[in-house]
Image: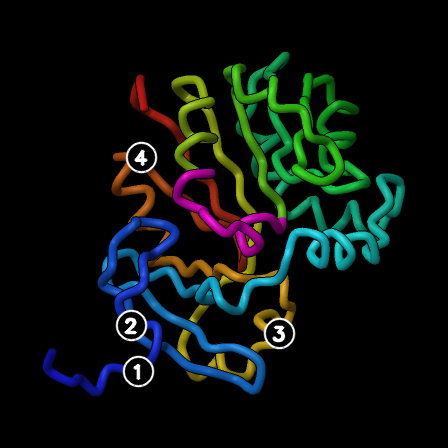
């Protein structure tokens, strides 16, 4: 076989689009990062990913209490734009709610019915049989090992006219990424950008809105999916 000069991990499968048009992006002292030329997702190759036990131990250190005013203010960046687009009596799912589901509590206080799911703290697979008017994922996507599969499942659970509300910090450039503290969290393995979300919205034939620096709203305008 002819020897190539491709860096390690080029050609690994992308977790979002499942393509293999992936190339080396950058590296730091702990991990290497790959970018997909098809969908623009930046991700950490599987060899650098930690176990579920270590992942949960890291989350257990978080102190996000549902009644913490500062945490609620942070979540309001996602809560406010989603809430403003909902009809009275809408039902939703807070996906990846964590040990203190503050976002779900905020929606319930406004009269919405909200289910919660988290693989570590609220593992209730029955929610995946439901249909919802809105689904939120706050600071979740960066942790997903297979974001494409998870997002397709969530999209299929939305009713026509439903909203998928996401909050995650975005990649802006490789230069900024290399200095970015956000990538240093070992539980963060997928990094989205506006082009990556635009690719996803185009694949779903759905409109996408970018609100502020880190909130993304995708509306399901077509039946099916």
Is label 2 or label 4 in front? Answer: 2
Circle 2 residue: 10
Among numbered discs 3 and 2, the one appearing first in the sequence: 2
Location of the C terminus by quadrant is top left
Q: Quadrant of residue 37?
A: bottom left
Circle 1 residue: 7
Q: CA distance from mark 1 to mark 4?
A: 35 Å
Looking at the image, is 160 positioned above or below residue 153?
above
The magenta-colored residue range is 139-150
The reply to whether discs 1 and 2 touch (Cβ–Cβ < 8 Å) is yes
Is disc 4 placed on a helix, strand or loop? loop
Q: Residues within 10 Å of mark 2 (few under 14, many from 20)?
A: some
Circle 3 residue: 184
The reply to whether discs 3 and 1 touch (Cβ–Cβ < 8 Å) is no
Q: CA distance from mark 2 to mark 4?
A: 30 Å
Q: Quadrant of residue 36?
A: bottom left
Q: Identify which residue, 191 or 50, lies in the foreground.
A: 50
The reply to whether discs 4 and 3 touch (Cβ–Cβ < 8 Å) is no
The structure residue drawn at horizontal position 43% and vertical position 84%, both measured from the top left corner, is 175
- Which numbered marker is on residue 73? none
* Rendering coords of residue 7 (x, y %): 30, 82
Q: Identify which residue, 208 or 169, lies in the foreground.
A: 169
Q: Residues within 10 Å of mark 4 (few under 14, many from 20)?
A: some
Is label 3 or label 2 in front? Answer: 2
Is label 3 or label 1 in front? Answer: 1
Q: Residues within 10 Å of mark 3 (few under 14, many from 20)?
A: some
Among numbered discs 3 and 1, the one appearing first in the sequence: 1
Circle 4 residue: 206
Looking at the image, is 75 positioned above or below residue 191?
above
Q: Is residue 28 left or right of residue 193?
A: right
């Amino acid at each position: 076989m002819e020897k190539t000069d491709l860096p390690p991990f080029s050609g690994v499968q992308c977790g979002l689009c499942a393509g293999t048009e992936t190339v080396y992006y950058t590296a730091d002292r702990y991990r290497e990062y790959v970018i997909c030329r098809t969908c623009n997702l930046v991700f950490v190759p599987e060899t650098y990913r930690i176990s579920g036990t270590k992942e949960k131990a890291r989350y257990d250190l978080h102190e996000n209490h549902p009644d913490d005013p500062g945490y609620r203010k942070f979540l309001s960046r996602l809560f406010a734009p989603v809430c403003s687009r909902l009809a009275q009596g809408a039902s939703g799912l807070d996906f990846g709610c964590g040990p203190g589901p503050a976002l779900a509590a905020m929606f319930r206080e406004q009269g919405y019915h909200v289910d919660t799911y988290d693989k570590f703290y609220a593992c209730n697979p029955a929610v995946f049989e439901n249909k919802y008017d809105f689904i939120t994922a706050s600071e979740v996507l960066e942790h997903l090992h297979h974001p494409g599969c998870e997002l397709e499942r969530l999209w299929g659970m939305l009713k026509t006219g439903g909203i998928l509300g996401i909050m995650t910090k975005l990649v802006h450039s490789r230069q900024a990424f290399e200095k970015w503290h956000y990538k240093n969290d070992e539980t963060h393995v997928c990094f989205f950008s506006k082009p990556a979300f635009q690719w996803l919205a185009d694949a779903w034939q759905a409109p996408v809105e970018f609100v502020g620096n880190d909130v993304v709203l995708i509306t399901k305008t077509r039946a099916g999916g």
